[in-house]
């Protein structure tokens, strides 16, 4: 657009110049080689302009002829490059689609048209084609050659990392990830793998530095970074609690400041404070964590904050926790345990039953069994509570990747993932599905379709082919004295039941036996009585 405006401005200036000369007539006399040439000023100006234009055109033609070999070669070079990039693009698409044959074909075509030093993507396409062909050794060699090129180094490290992961060599994978994270901490795959390596080795300071680098590059959000820092600081405090109490206390307090609701951080911070006789500050930390989410470790540490306290003092501290978080099962269980230690069986039983009503779980029934044994010693009631505990849902625990742990750990023992443990109930046991509503009398009992005949009719045994049609098939479910429902096996008589409108027939004297069926000895069959089987 600018060139057009400049061209129009030049034309406009020439027009004004010629118009100005036309309004001012004059003559020009030129003497050359003994001759005199006299022309008007306008003609002279036109002649000068024409000569200048002719010189410019001649110069352009000479320059074009002089540069014609380079222009022609550049045309073919550009055309060749365009074909090469087209082949490269097609090869990358084929590699992404999993077409190894087409990817290899386009790799060779692109390598002929474009030099490797001009386009690094040819190395990537070559390595991807080798992977699709199953040549993993060749692919690893190509990734290793990328390490010498600063522009391709991260790509080579990524490829070697994936190959090491495929082979299951975690040490090599973490080595390549560490090299990549040192150059570019913003790479998620490198940072995560390096973080797992550092946490597995217990290098908490190195892991904290990596988290800070991720936070500075804005790879992770501020809240996520603070959460990870709290986990790492808690692990560091646990590791230093025996060797360097001051450093452990500093790390634990910072972790608690970042995540006040994180129970492990609150427990380790309060433990260190209690050891230094700072009971007031440690209790405040535990109370804040308890308000956010009650945890049995918090209750245990809070009630035993002062080792010399009497059992009644511990009971009062447990009741204080209950006031902070009312109508919660953990609060009732904490009071029940403290009351059992104080031999206040009435309060212990009341709180244990209240916990069962709020959250039916295994630990509540076990505690109720302990209370029953300590108060009355009635083994029947103790066994009843224990049987209910077996069928009740399990208590919450620290769970990570299918592993249940009694203690919190910063990383998963299976995958090495940071902050993998969660406080929740483990997978329910199979028995919990049976009689899961025995403590809920208001739950409706599923109705069973009534039979057309009375339920008192007895099932008769089929002996030597005799057909007993007295008992319907629906009499398969009975109830025991406790009201629990069981399922009994359906006997052969149920399947041989004859409807009311059936014609009477004479029983067969002997059932025909199949050639491969030896049958049953009649004497042995007569000695056997009818059996009913329970499902459970």
Image (tube, grey):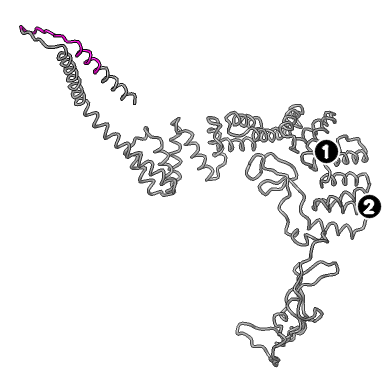
Residue at coordinates 80% horizontally, 61% vertically from top-left? 443
In the image, is 525 to the left or to the right of 213? right
In the image, is 319 to the left or to the right of 64? right
Residue 225's disc number: none
* In the foreground, 25 or 300: 25
Q: CA distance from mark 1 to mark 2?
A: 26 Å
Q: Residue furthest front?
A: 23
State whether residue 2 is above or below residue 343: above
Give the percent coordinates (x, y) of residue 25.
Answer: 17, 10
Q: Which residues are magenta?
A: 14-34
Residue at coordinates 83% horizontally, 28% vertically from top-left? 276
* In the foreground, 516 or 216: 216
Give the percent coordinates (x, y) of residue 42.
Answer: 16, 14
According to the picture, the residue beneath numbered tag 2 turns out to be 375
Give the percent coordinates (x, y) of residue 20.
Answer: 23, 13
Q: Quadrant of the rendered structure where residue 106 is?
A: top left
Residue 28 on the magenta span: yes
- Dot 1 or dot 2: first in sequence order is 1
Residue at coordinates 74% horizontally, 60% vertically from top-left? 433
* In the foreground, 304 or 40: 40
In the image, is 45 to the left or to the right of 125? left
State whether residue 435 is above or below residue 418: below
Give the percent coordinates (x, y) of residue 382.
Answer: 88, 57
Residue 21 on the magenta span: yes
Name the image quarter holding the C terminus: bottom right
State whether residue 308 is above or below residue 518: above
Label 2 crowd (10 A; few <14 / some 14-19 / many >=20) = some
In the image, is 351 to the left or to the right of 43? right
Q: Quadrant of the rendered structure where residue 93 is?
A: top left
Residue 301's disc number: 1
Residue at coordinates 56% horizontally, 34% vertically from top-left? 178
Name the image quarter holding the N terminus: top left
């Amino acid at each position: 657009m600018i060139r057009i405006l400049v061209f129009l401005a030049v034309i406009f200036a020439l027009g004004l110049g010629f118009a100005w000369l036309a309004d001012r007539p004059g003559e020009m006399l030129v003497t050359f080689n003994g001759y005199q040439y006299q022309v008007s000023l306008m003609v002279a100006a036109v002649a000068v302009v024409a000569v200048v234009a002719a010189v410019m055109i001649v110069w352009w033609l000479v320059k074009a002829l002089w540069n014609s070999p380079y222009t022609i070669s550049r045309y073919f070079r550009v055309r060749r490059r365009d074909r090469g990039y087209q082949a490269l693009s097609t090869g990358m698409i084929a590699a992404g689609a999993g077409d190894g044959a087409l990817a290899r074909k386009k790799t060779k075509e692109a390598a002929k048209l474009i030099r490797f030093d001009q386009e690094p993507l040819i190395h990537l396409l070559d390595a991807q084609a080798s992977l699709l062909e199953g040549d993993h050794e060749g692919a690893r060699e190509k990734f290793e050659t990328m390490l010498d090129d600063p522009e391709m180094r991260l790509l080579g490290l990524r490829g070697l990392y994936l190959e090491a992961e495929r082979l299951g060599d975690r040490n090599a994978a973490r080595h390549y990830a560490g090299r990549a994270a040192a150059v570019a901490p913003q790479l998620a795959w490198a940072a995560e793998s390096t973080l797992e390596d550092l946490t597995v080795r217990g290098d908490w300071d190195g892991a904290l530095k990596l988290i800070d680098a991720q936070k500075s590059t804005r790879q992770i959000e501020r809240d996520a970074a603070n959460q990870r820092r709290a986990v790492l600081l808690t692990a560091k405090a646990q590791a230093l609690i025996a060797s360097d109490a001051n450093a452990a206390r500093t790390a634990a307090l910072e972790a608690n400041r970042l995540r006040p609701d994180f129970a492990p951080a609150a427990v380790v911070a309060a433990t260190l404070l209690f050891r230094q006789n700072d009971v007031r500050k440690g209790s405040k930390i535990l109370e804040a964590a308890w308000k956010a989410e009650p945890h049995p470790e918090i209750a245990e540490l809070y009630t035993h904050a002062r080792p010399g306290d009497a059992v009644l003092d511990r009971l009062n501290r447990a009741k204080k926790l209950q006031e902070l978080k009312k109508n919660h099962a953990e609060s009732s269980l904490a009071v029940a345990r403290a009351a059992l230690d104080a031999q206040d069986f009435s309060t212990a039983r009341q709180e244990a039953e209240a916990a069962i009503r709020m959250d039916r779980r295994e630990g509540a029934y076990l505690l109720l069994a302990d209370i029953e044994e300590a108060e009355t010693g009635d083994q029947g009631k103790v066994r009843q509570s224990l049987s209910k505990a077996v069928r009740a849902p399990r208590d919450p625990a620290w769970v990570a990747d299918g592993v249940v742990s009694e203690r919190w750990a910063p990383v998963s023992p299976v995958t090495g993932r940071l902050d993998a443990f969660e406080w929740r109930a483990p997978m329910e046991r199979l028995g919990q599905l049976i009689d899961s509503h025995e403590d809920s009398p208001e739950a409706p009992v599923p109705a069973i379709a009534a039979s057309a005949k009375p339920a008192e009719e007895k099932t008769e045994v089929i002996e030597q082919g005799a057909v007993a049609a007295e008992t319907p098939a629906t009499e398969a479910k009975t109830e025991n004295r406790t009201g629990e429902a069981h399922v009994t096996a359906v006997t052969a008589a149920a399947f041989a039941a004859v409807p009311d409108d059936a014609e009477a027939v004479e029983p067969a004297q002997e059932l025909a036996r199949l050639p491969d069926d030896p049958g049953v000895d009649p004497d042995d069959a007569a000695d056997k009585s009818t059996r009913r089987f329970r499902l459970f």
